[in-house]
Amino acid sequence: MTFLLTKIFLKSSIQKMGDKYAFTSNAKSNKNKLILYGLLLLYLIGVIGFLSVSLIDNLKEIHQETVFIGMILLLVLGVTIMQTIFSGINLLYFTKDTDSVLPLPIKPYQIILARTNVIMLVDLVVNIFVGLVPLLIYGYMLKCDSMFYISSIITLIILPILPVILISLLIMIIMSFSKITKNRNRFQLIATLLVIILIILLSVGMTKLEANTITDEQMMQMMTGANNMVNMIKGYFPTLGFGIDAITSGNIVTMIMQFAKIIGITAVGFVIYIFLAQKLYFKGLIGNLYSTSGRRSGKVKISNKKLGLGKQYIGKEFKILFRNPVYLVQCVLPALLFPILIIFLVGFGMSSEDMQEMSQLTNMLANNKSLVLYGVLAVTQFFSMIIYVSATAISRDGPNAVFMKYIPVSLYKQYAYKTIPNIVMNLISTIVVLGIAVYLINISILDCILLLIVSIIMSSFTSFLETLVDLKRPKLHWSSEYAVVKQNMNLIFPMIFSLINVGAVVLFNYLLQNIPAYTGIIVVGVVFAIANIIVNKYMKNHEYKLAENIM
Amino acid sequence: MIEIKNVSKSYVKDKKSVNGLNLNIQNGEIFGFLGPNGAGKTTTIRMITGILEPDEGDILVDGHSIKKEPLEAKRNFGFVPDSPDIFLKLKGIEYLNFLAEVYNVPSEERQNRIEELTKKFEIYKDLNSNIESYSHGMRQKIVICGALLSNPKNWILDEPMTGLDPKASYDLKEMMRNHAKAGNTVFFSTHILEVAEKLCDRVGIINKGELVFVGTFEEMKEKFKEQTSLEELFLEITEE
């Protein structure tokens, strides 16, 4: 029964990534899609491969190459934790099939097991991709034997189970309080934020604890002894050390022993998890299912003041974005959280020595205006890859997107209104990046204003392009909002466009090296302003054709 | 007035979902659009409202072509879609204020119109709440209020009675009658034959994309004399 239930939950959670991306009976279109996916896969493997090769090379020079294995396993654990925070809350509590499953004669633990299996399977796919490619490259570069590959695969499968059940349990504990709230939306948001904050605090705490337990002498020993540095990483997660030892030992008995330890700890964790989950899960689930967003009474404020269509429309977009916890957490928060996290790290993480080094860097950069301006501009563009507002502008409306087509407002205007929130989010993240640049490398206010203008011109171009992609390939039929932001191939495009913009900045820096940096940046702005005009003209001229897939 | 002129639409090659449809819905008329599931009712309504573009033919709303002057045509109708689950994260009042802006309802009329409609449908006191907290019937009511806010001459309603309580259903029918009496047009689809019989001046029955009957109920009964009940008449017209 648990297997069957897992299969059903998995099918309903992993829907098609979007109709336009699915293979059809049309051989030519399938061939094109296959080429596109192949190129995309090659590109991603290429990026991961390039980074891995350079890192392994550098580590080999200082005889610390096993640190790479530790880093990859740590990355896998990190990705698992982040993935479980976002997918766990949605898969456990906010799927639409809950209503249909609860009345069925299925034992509670079977539902919990099936739900947990789905979270683990989704994580496993991501982990194989994130972890396996670098480990294969490591194995090839260091000419490892077959035992290395077997131990790597087994570790990638069993290591992430413990973080999944720990995070799921944390989610269940927080969600079990949902009964006390009448406002489900607000609670959903607070619960998600609480989980994120708790995880960040825990990781910071563990990092500090780990750092404090290592004395300067120990650190010197680690640095000088071959492959000793990896020991620094082992303490970050209870089973991480066993995983690293299993892969690096090269001894079959040690490998089996290490796996036995991981499986033993995970099994104990699993038994405790199932025991506690049976007490917690349904409490939160039912509380969440039957608490509504609450009706409010009171004086109705009917606005008879005309705000203007643009303001009303953009206001509506922001309201929907901010009031929907899934959209807020997935589309808006990363843009705000990442720069804030950087500020946090910059502000609290720097020692006085670091600050001294930074001031040396500032002095060095003061003589290289071009590097500063182009560099900061590239960083602002880099952060636009985590803003998914435009990439989901049409998909977020789901079946309601047809509303756009029967109201008497030009479709082009509506496309623009739907793109503006993405530009605003870009503006916020750009301001944060520029603030950090002022603090760290002392760039002038005039530089900031110039960079802000050019950065916004560049990101408004990508914002319009992302809306265009979502118009051409909208994902309108979904079972939960989560599918729009997680199971949606369109979300690759912000990353691609952002990297193209970063590449363009690097290219312009190279091409315009003979002209003053200010003029160069203005040229970049003018080029992207022209690109903006072209994309807008295209959208205006094809406004009806572009809406063909909205139905 | 709504004129549907020789309209066809296919979703897949060689299979027309609507085939050569011709219909004229006159001012002052309530027109019921009937047909079994998958007959082409929603496709037709989607073409009238501009959601789908016809492959052939054209549709005029008060003389404005939905193909050539879409914005003008859209300003002349109010549309109630088949699903009322729309903008669930907005408050009722936010939804109506937004539509007032979209349909350019004059400031001085806005307050009266919203109060009048929402009080009639008994949702006025719930306007401060998010639409997602409304029951299905209340959502249907707010969508109807939104469609009628700009007092459009032509009403296009897709299954408007679904989910309404008897009082709201009665009120809506009364409003439809009064709207038609004032020289305006009401075009609606329904599965409830009794509603269509009591309310409509004329009905059109569509089956497999083809219009198989247009006329009054008297004409229908005249044509199929041997059938006694309304259901039997409908089945006779739409069966293979």
Image (cartoon, coloured by chain):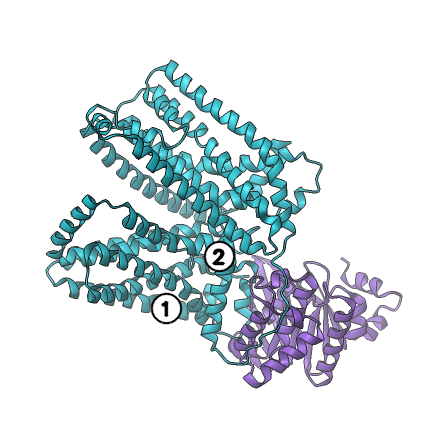
Chain colours: A cyan, B purple
Residue A430 higher or lower than B48, as above or below: above
Q: Is residue A225 left or right of residue A390?
A: left
The disc placed on residue A474 is 2
Residue A501 seen anywhere in this rendered image of the structure: no
Q: Amino acid at mark 1?
A: Asn
Instruction: Kindly state the secondary structure of the residue where label 1 is placed.
Output: helix
Q: Amino acid at mark 2?
A: Pro
Residue A34 x %, y %? 41, 44
Q: Nearer the viewer, residue B229 or A149?
A: A149
Disc 1 from disc 2: Cα separation = 19 Å
Residue B114 higher or lower than A396, as above or below: below
Q: Earlier in the sequence, mark 1 or mark 2?
A: 2
Q: Nearer the viewer, residue A102 or B201?
A: A102
Q: Is residue B135 left or right of residue B97?
A: right
The chain that hosts pointer 1 is A
Q: Is residue A506 left or right of residue A412?
A: left
Instruction: Kindly state the secondary structure of the residue where label 2 is placed.
Output: loop
Q: Nearer the viewer, residue A460 or A199?
A: A199
Residue A537 seen anywhere in this rendered image of the structure: yes
Residues packed near mark 2 inside 10 Å, few (<14), some (14 to 19) or many (20 plus): many
Residue A430 x %, y %? 31, 60
Same chain? Circles 1 and 2? yes
Q: Residue at x 68, y 61 (%)?
A: B135
Residue A195 higher or lower than A451, as above or below: above
Residue B197 x %, y %? 80, 71
The disc placed on residue A146 is none
* Disc 1: which residue: A536
